[in-house]
Image (cartoon, rainbow, N blue to C red):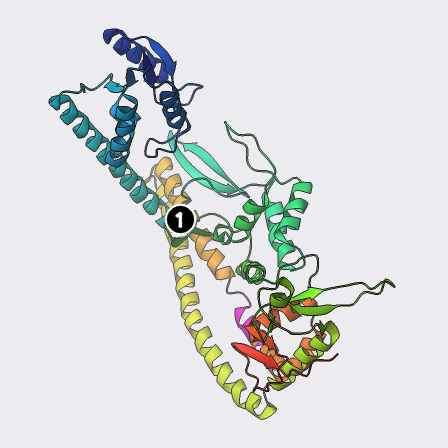
């Protein structure tokens, strides 16, 4: 009895070479005087891994039918494994199950020569696999360095193929159906009052689905996919490959400001101040100064239906520590945090000293950007001159239409990249000046600004100024300092 293992190749239901492999393997079985009892076909799974469904199924079958199978027939050794370590491990299992490996294309058997041939062919398969992977990586690296996209573009874009003069070019275009929903997702999440799970629900309600393929139909996005989308720099016009970022030729869907705002919100949730059923802007900011545990929000209701809001020590609640910290009324704790902001305000005299120095540093920063702006303008002018020269050469019949069109297309790509970067400079200096004044105004009025802020803004300010605010019941008094920790005077109310 024998098993056949043809490898999946091609693009049809069974691939173009499967019938030929099956026929060759059957002839090999006949030459061995064996009867084929089962066939395992790898459908589009890489042979570089042993984590393959058909291979696992075959191993289970061999274990169940131990003693009833004599041969495993493969079309080539590399159809079974493509590195020596996997080959040795798989053949060790074959020895354990007392079955022999036979190849239709290679002369391997249990003789010393056959074993040597097996080892050589296995090593060749490993070399081929690793060399091919290396060549693919080199090609992909070159592609992304020139602004291309490695692999499938994320949701909001479409991989397209164009044929010009018989030459195929692959590009990435904006998906007119899905890109507006992707942009809306970034804008909505940046507002800070929605979780990724809730955003996913809203996106599904609005009809956002994955792009269908030949094998898989479109389906609604899930939470994990949306989370990855919100942190994907591809939507900024940046392609990442092997951990390195490259400027892409594709059109950005969002601005850098919006992406950073979304990133800040994601980071806030990651650090612990997530939007839960019992949410508050002090959660994950206030900690127990007695035992070091987190303070958590509780909203108990008495027998008269009156609800009270307290922060309590999680170490005491869970009995992980022997902490005796009593419950802290929410209103009292909020007022203590506000008092902290009174102590970290910048004095007016110091502020007036800082203002000219900060403006000087800002001017230096803008001057370096000015040099970059001049370089971009020079590049823009150079590309436009090249376009004019191409047209002149074409009109003078010194350049064929096909070559002129191809060169013009490349220049248009380069020009669009330069102009996109130039657009980012519009209003930059004015925006920087406004941000500086707003920052100085806040530094002079931290208390006032904090009390007027929304809950989301308060949460972000707390994480900006404090790593932790420690609430102690032992009467310790410590000098407040913004980072890493703050102590609140511990005369807790009863």
Examine the rendered structure and indicate whether residue 433 appears above or below residue 255. Answer: below
Camera-side residue: 339 or 58?
A: 58
Q: Residue furthest left?
A: 113
User: Circle 1 is placed at which residue position?
Assistant: 147
Q: Quadrant of residue 466?
A: bottom right
Q: Circle 1 — which element? A: loop
Kindly tell me whether residue 219 is visible in this rendering. yes
Query: In the depicted view, which residue is nearer to us: 399 or 185?
Result: 185
The question of residue 329 being in magenta is answered with: no
Q: What x and y, as percent, mark residue 5? A: 34, 19
- The answer to whether residue 186 is left or right of residue 240 is right
**Left or right relative to 14: residue 266:** right
Q: In which quadrant will I find the N terminus?
A: top left
- Residue 235 screen position, x and y as percent: 51, 51
Q: Position of residue 111 (x, y in %)?
A: 13, 20
Query: In the drawing, does residue 307 fall left or right of residue 281?
Result: right
Q: Count every numbered label the image shows and give the total.
A: 1
The residue drawn where x is 36% and y is 13% is: 19
Q: Main secondary structure of the magenta part?
A: helix
Q: Quadrant of residue 375?
A: bottom left
Name the quarter where the C terminus is drawn. bottom right
Tell me what residue is drawn at x 37 percent, y 11 percent: 37
Asked whether residue 206 is in view, the answer is no
Q: Residue 151, position in %: x, y?
A: 42, 40
Which residue lies at the image location 42% right of the left edge and 58% below the top edge? 380
Q: Is residue 453 above or below residue 242?
A: below
Tell me the magenta residue range: 426-435
Mark 1 closeness class: few <14, some 14–19, many ≥20 residues within 10 Å: many
Residue 332 higher or lower than 426, as above or below: below
Residue furthest to the front:
322
Q: Residue at x 40, y 43 (%)?
A: 150
């Amino acid at each position: 009895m024998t098993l056949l293992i043809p490898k999946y190749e091609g693009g049809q239901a069974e691939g173009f070479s499967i019938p030929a492999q099956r026929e060759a393997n059957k002839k090999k079985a006949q030459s061995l005087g064996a009867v084929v009892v089962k066939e395992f076909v790898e459908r589009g799974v890489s042979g570089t891994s042993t984590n393959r469904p058909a291979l696992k199924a075959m191993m289970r079958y061999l274990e169940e039918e131990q003693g009833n199978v004599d041969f495993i027939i493969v079309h080539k050794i590399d159809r079974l494994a493509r590195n020596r370590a996997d080959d040795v491990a798989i053949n060790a299992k074959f020895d354990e199950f007392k079955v022999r490996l036979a190849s239709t294309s290679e002369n391997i058997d249990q003789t010393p020569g056959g074993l040597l041939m097996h080892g050589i062919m296995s090593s060749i398969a490993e070399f081929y696999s690793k060399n091919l992977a290396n060549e693919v990586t080199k090609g992909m690296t070159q592609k992304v360095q020139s602004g291309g996209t490695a692999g499938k573009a994320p949701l909001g874009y479409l991989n397209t193929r164009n044929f010009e003069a018989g030459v195929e070019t692959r590009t990435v275009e904006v998906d007119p159906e899905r890109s507006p929903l992707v942009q809306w997702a970034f804008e909505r999440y940046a507002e800070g009052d929605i979780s990724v799970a809730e955003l996913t629900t809203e996106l599904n309600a609005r009809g956002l689905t994955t792009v269908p393929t030949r094998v898989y139909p479109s389906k609604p996005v899930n939470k994990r996919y949306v989370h990855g989308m919100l942190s994907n720099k591809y939507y900024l016009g940046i392609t990442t490959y092997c951990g390195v970022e490259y400027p892409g030729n594709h059109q950005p869907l969002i601005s850098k400001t919006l992406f950073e705002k979304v990133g800040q919100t994601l980071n806030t949730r990651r650090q612990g101040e997530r939007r839960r059923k019992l949410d508050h802007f002090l959660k994950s900011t206030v900690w127990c100064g007695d035992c070091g545990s987190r303070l958590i929000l509780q909203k108990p209701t008495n027998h008269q239906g009156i609800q009270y809001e307290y922060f309590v020590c999680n170490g005491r609640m869970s009995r992980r520590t022997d902490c005796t910290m009593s419950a802290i009324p929410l209103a009292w704790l909020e007022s203590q945090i506000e008092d902290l902001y009174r102590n970290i305000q910048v004095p007016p005299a110091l502020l007036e000293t800082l203002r000219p120095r900060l403006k000087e540093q800002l001017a230096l920063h803008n001057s370096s950007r000015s040099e970059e702006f001049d370089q971009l303008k020079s590049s823009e002018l150079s590309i436009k001159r090249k376009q004019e020269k191409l047209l002149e050469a074409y009109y003078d019949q010194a350049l064929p239409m096909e070559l002129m069109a191809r060169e013009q297309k490349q220049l248009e790509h380069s020009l669009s990249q330069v102009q996109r970067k130039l657009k980012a400079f519009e209003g930059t200096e004015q925006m920087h000046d406004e941000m500086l004044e707003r920052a100085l105004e806040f530094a002079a009025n931290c208390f006032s600004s904090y009390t007027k802020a929304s809950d989301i803004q308060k949460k972000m300010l707390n994480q900006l100024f404090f790593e932790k605010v420690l609430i102690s019941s032992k009467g310790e008094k410590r000098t407040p300092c913004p980072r890493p920790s703050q102590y609140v005077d511990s005369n807790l109310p009863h």
